[in-house]
Amino acid sequence: MNQQRHGFLVLLLLGMFSVYLPFGFAQMSSPTTSDIVKRTMAAALARCRSKTTDGVVAMTFIPLSNDEIETIKSLGSAAVEPLSTYLDSVDCGFARLFALKFLTALRNPAALGAFQRAFAQDQWEVTRVYALAGMFETSKTAAEPYVKAALEDKSPSVRHMAEGLWLSYQPHKSDK
């Protein structure tokens, strides 16, 4: 009788604690490129935000780390599309600027459209300067009309960047 009771308890416990687990439940999937970009951007942006003792949110520019840049560079051209989505964000922080810095580090021709879009649409001159510089780093030939146009820009910072890029472009142009 004791053995029957013991067997019954074992079956009861197995029934209580057994749960149907889908196949592959314990397997971890590797993060997608988009996940890695989101995580890297979130970490970079979080470092820039703080709260004062009065509860006021403060934004302080803290440059991207070399590790963050290397992480994004290791993703290659697959990172262009997820980074480009930050250029359309309404975030009033540094999201666009960081996205442009990452895109520049990639030096991938697939990013040219993102640079051109950022240069044309953004009103913050710092973002426009980085978009122009990123375009130039990626393809001097593709950037040429934008650099020429920026020589007449209303922003002194954008004009200054364009002048520097234009001067550095001229010697290369005569080599052809």
Image: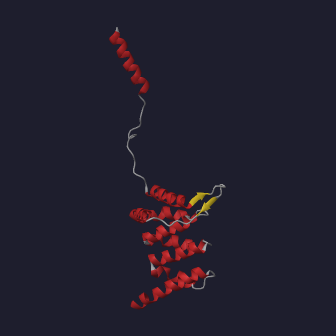
Q: Residue at x 40, y 48 (%)?
A: 29
**Quarter of the rendering occupied by the N terminus:** top left
Q: Is residue 40 above or below residue 15?
A: below
Drawn side of residue 53 relative to residue 12, left or right: right
Q: Residue at x 46, y 65 (%)?
A: 80
Furthest-left residue in this view: 3
Closer-to-camera residue (85/7)? 7
The colour scheme applied to this rendered structure is secondary structure
Q: Position of residue 103 (x, y in %)?
A: 47, 69
Drawn side of residue 37 relative to residue 125, left or right: left
Furthest-bottom residue in this view: 174
Closer-to-camera residue (144/132)? 132
Number of labelled discs?
0
> Image quarter for residue 150?
bottom right
Q: Is residue 53 above or below residue 139?
A: above
Closer-to-camera residue (115/128)? 128
Furthest-front residue in this view: 53
Q: Position of residue 125 (x, y in %)?
A: 60, 75
Q: Position of residue 139 (x, y in %)?
A: 45, 78
Q: Residue at x 58, y 80 (%)?
A: 157
Q: Is residue 164 above or below residue 44?
A: below
Q: Is residue 1 above or below residue 80?
A: above
Q: Position of residue 63 (x, y in %)?
A: 50, 67
**Quarter of the rendering occupied by the C terminus:** bottom left
Q: Residue at x 51, y 57 (%)?
A: 42
